[in-house]
Image: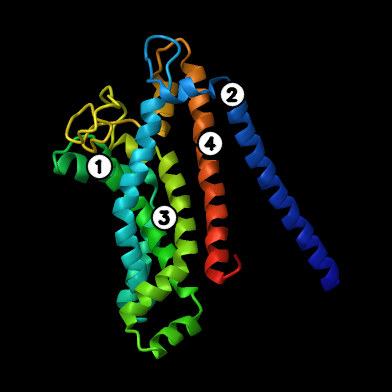
Amino acid sequence: MKPRVTDKIATAVFYIIAALLILLLVLFAAYLIYQGRSRLNLHFLTSAPNSLEAGGGIGPPLFNSIYIVVLSLAITLPIGLSAGIYMAEYAKPTRLTKMIRFCIEALASLPSIVIGLFGFLIFVQKTGWGFNLLSGALAVSILNLPVITRISEDSIRNVPHSVKEASLALGATHWQTIVRVLIPCAIPGLVTGLIITSGRVFGEAAALIFTSGVSGYPLDFTNFNPMDSSSPLNPMRPAETLAVFIWKVNSEGTAPDARLVADGASAVLIISVFVFNIASRILGKYLNNKFAGNS
């Protein structure tokens, strides 16, 4: 067979595979949103769940999901960025470096339920904290740490070498070059990775069932004391995130409209993940154009 014919056949096969993947994603998202369309309103998004009567909402689980994203990023970002800087700028090609890379790849491939069981043993039982949001944030931070490390390393490595050499030639130290030149140039890639990671945390369930719990105290959104159990800002309270709430309502919901609540919550979750991904594309493109001087 002629190479040109082979190339056309291979290209057609790849287009078909890509079209099937897009179709599968569109059908999946459209089905979830269609099923939950009747609950996509402000009352559903802001009201508390009701396990006995119809008409409950997803306000506290939705807030808990956003709060645990903030907590996990506060833990993951400093550690992952520092590790990425070390791997990109300081690590030599030694056996230790190869071992570190192997550990990062192995950690990234672990199932989330295994991380959840590890978090249950260490953060819930060994520390004596019990189920709480901080334990959940620490568990999902373990999931995200390899991703943030690799994104940070790749973003810094992708900065043109001439930029680094120009900074050093002007008399800046290596550390000054990293902080004032390399990291600002790598910000578009870092922001994109962080937003995608946030979307993953938002939809995570398996690791949080064993760490943050599947139920929580009634919240008083006028209480801003982070030490009070009814305050939404308290990181040491047990809480269910939106993904865990969907699992619980589907498995043991007793409200007459449990199915409708689960459908509505699933639609909100899939829309939120899409928003995270679209935002990462737009913000990454904007920052890339800004730092490249195109805008």
Residue 63 vertical placement versus 199 (above, below): above
Is residue 173 in sight in this rendering? yes
Label 3 element class: loop
Do the residues bearing badges 1 and 4 touch, measured as CB atoms within 8 Å? no
Residue at the outermost front position: 295
For marks 2 and 3, the one nearer the N-term is 2
Q: Quadrant of residue 221?
A: top left
- Front in this rendered view, residue 156 or 29: 156
The residue at which mark 4 appears reads as 270
The residue at which mark 3 appears reads as 109
- The mark tally for this picture is 4
Image point (46%, 74%), residue name: 157
Q: Quadrant of residue 180?
A: bottom left
Indicate the position of residue 207 as horizontal and vertical percent values.
34, 41
Left or right of residue 163: residue 101? left
For marks 3 and 1, the one nearer the N-term is 3
Q: Nearer the viewer, mark 4 or mark 3?
A: 4
Q: Nearer the viewer, mark 3 or mark 1?
A: 1
Label 2 element class: helix
- For mark 4, does the 10 Å Cα neighbourhood hold few (<14), some (14 to 19), or many (20 or more) residues? some
Image point (37%, 81%), residue name: 93
Image point (31%, 46%), residue name: 71
Instruction: Using the numbered discs, state the Cα–Cα distance from disc 1 to disc 4 in whole angstroms.
Output: 25 Å
Disc sitting over residue 135 in the figure: 1
Image point (29%, 31%), residue name: 239
Name the amino acid type tagged 4.
Ile
Residue 227 vertical placement versus 112 (above, below): above
- Front in this rendered view, residue 80 or 165: 165
Instruction: Using the numbered discs, state the Cα–Cα distance from disc 4 to disc 3 in whole angstroms.
Output: 23 Å
Disc sitting over residue 37 in the figure: 2
- For mark 3, does the 10 Å Cα neighbourhood hold few (<14), some (14 to 19), or many (20 or more) residues? few
